[in-house]
């Protein structure tokens, strides 16, 4: 459960809140189809990745290097750079959340949030605290957003109908949402956490399956609730603030108390993403040198401090954050393809036989995401 919530809360960050609201504004009830499609794609991707990592008992970069020397370093570079870019935005989101809730200056709020994250990783039993922290704040986010969804009175029947038969299908939305849920470092956050917790091997595959699916379900539930909250506000004829769409959803639906709730949700989403991104990024490099492994807490702290300093002195790098989100979607087919190829190598998996349906569905996801990614790249170029 700790690994599931680490993955889920890593996905639920400031970008998650903004993307969900913006796409609901653009696609209205049809965004329900995007959510359903991405949940199915996410489950297939996570089951393939988590199972192969658990069976081989190798982190993604180690597995990649054994498959093709140097590939692991390339994958780690993509993951860590994306994780740093996202963490700058996550720190900014944490500062904004505390500003809404307490009135603190965003820079001071970001610094305070940085200290909270550093405190968690400084504890002797940081892993257990990390698990409890992400579970508690994940549940709190869902409860507060559920209140807003009820307050906005969304058109549930229309949402249900267009989830199955959409009026509009948007490739950019699917790539962005999948990338924001299981792209980049998020793909491996829970799987690497399971390895660190000693849950691996064929005998633990039922737990691995349950954890992977639970992580996607938690993320999907949060996105559905936020979608309904935004849809209710939009269907009511209200206009969202372009500068901060999710905040306006909370405020329009429930007034000042809703705005305060947004601050809490934003801080919870941001701080859990900060610790998730930092933790997972370091798991991608700690196997490259014994000194990194020995001082991984220090390296994690430095990554968080660096992200905070960049935000405080330079400001929120919106363009970098948006670009990193889209690139996460482009990274997924590469990472998943590597995992699927590795699953067929007996020198890596031993006598484990990866289920045929998972291989077929996994390659289907690789194909779909590659095609959608090409459409997205084409739209950027043109």
Image (cartoon, rainbow, N blue to C red):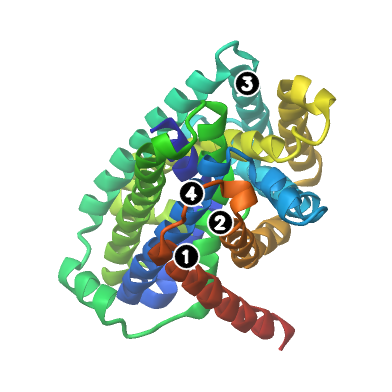
Q: Are marks 1 and 3 in contact (CB under 8 Å)?
A: no
Residue holding disc 4: 352
Point out residue 262 in the picture as x, y percentages from the top left corner.
Answer: 42, 43
Q: Earlier in the sequence, mark 3 or mark 4?
A: 3
Answer with left or right where residue 108 lies relative to residue 369: right
Q: CA distance from mark 3 to mark 4?
A: 35 Å
Q: Earlier in the sequence, mark 4 or mark 2?
A: 2
Q: Which mark is residue 121?
A: 3
Packing grade of label 4 (10 A; few <14, some 14-19, many >=20) is some
Q: Are marks 2 and 1 in contact (CB under 8 Å)?
A: yes
Point out residue 141 in the picture as x, y percentages from the top left corner.
Answer: 37, 39
State the quadrant of the N terminus.
top left
Answer with left or right where residue 243 lies relative to residue 77: left
Quarter where residue 252 is shown: bottom left
Q: Secondary structure at mark 2?
A: loop
Q: Earlier in the sequence, mark 2 or mark 1?
A: 2
Q: Which mark is residue 359?
A: 1
Q: CA distance from mark 3 to mark 2?
A: 33 Å
Q: Secondary structure at mark 1?
A: helix
Q: CA distance from mark 1 to mark 3?
A: 37 Å
Quarter where residue 34 is shown: bottom left
Q: Secondary structure at mark 4?
A: loop
Point out residue 298 in the picture as x, y percentages from the top left corner.
Answer: 76, 22
Residue 295 seen in the current view: no
Q: Secondary structure at mark 3?
A: helix
The answer to which of 145 and 198 lies nearer the viewer is 198
Q: Which callout, 3 or 4, points to the residue nearer the camera?
A: 4
The answer to which of 27 and 69 lies nearer the viewer is 69
Residue holding disc 2: 343
Q: Which callout, 4 or 1, points to the residue nearer the camera?
A: 4
């Amino acid at each position: 459960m700790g690994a599931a919530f680490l993955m889920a809360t890593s996905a639920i960050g400031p970008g998650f809140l903004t993307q969900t609201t913006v796409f609901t504004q653009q696609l209205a009830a049809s965004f329900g189809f995007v959510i359903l499609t991405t949940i199915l794609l996410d489950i297939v991707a996570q089951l393939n990745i988590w199972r192969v990592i658990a069976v081989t008992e190798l982190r993604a970069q180690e597995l990649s290097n054994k498959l093709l020397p140097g590939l692991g370093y390339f994958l780690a570079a993509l993951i860590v750079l994306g994780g740093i870019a996202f963490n700058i935005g996550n720190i900014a989101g944490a500062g904004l959340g505390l500003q809404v809730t307490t009135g603190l200056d965003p820079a001071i709020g970001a610094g305070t949030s940085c200290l909270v994250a550093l405190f968690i990783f400084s504890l002797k039993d940081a892993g257990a605290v990390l698990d409890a922290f992400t579970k508690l704040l994940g549940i709190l986010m869902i409860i507060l957003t559920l209140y807003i969804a009820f307050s906005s009175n969304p058109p549930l029947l229309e949402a249900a109908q267009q989830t199955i038969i959409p009026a509009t299908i948007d490739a950019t939305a699917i790539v962005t949402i999948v990338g924001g849920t299981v792209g980049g470092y998020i793909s491996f956050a829970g799987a690497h956490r399971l390895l660190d917790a000693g849950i691996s091997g064929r005998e633990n595959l039922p737990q691995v399956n349950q954890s992977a699916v639970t992580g996607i379900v938690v993320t999907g539930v949060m996105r559905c609730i936020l979608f309904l909250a935004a849809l209710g506000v939009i269907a009511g004829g209200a206009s969202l603030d372009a500068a901060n769409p999710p905040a306006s959803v909370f405020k329009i639906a429930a007034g000042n108390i809703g705005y305060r709730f947004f601050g809490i949700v934003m801080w919870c989403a941001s701080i859990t993403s900060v610790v998730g991104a930092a933790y997972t990024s370091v798991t991608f490099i700690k196997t490259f040198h014994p000194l990194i492994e020995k001082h991984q807490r220090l390296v994690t702290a430095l990554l968080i401090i660096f992200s905070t300093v960049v935000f405080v002195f330079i400001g929120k790098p919106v363009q970098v954050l948006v670009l990193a989100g889209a690139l996460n979607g482009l990274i997924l087919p590469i990472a998943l393809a590597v995992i699927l190829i590795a699953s067929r190598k007996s020198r890596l998996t031993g006598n484990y036989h990866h289920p045929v349906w998972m291989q077929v569905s996994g390659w289907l996801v690789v194909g779909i995401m590659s095609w959608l990614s090409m459409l997205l790249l084409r739209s950027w170029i043109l």
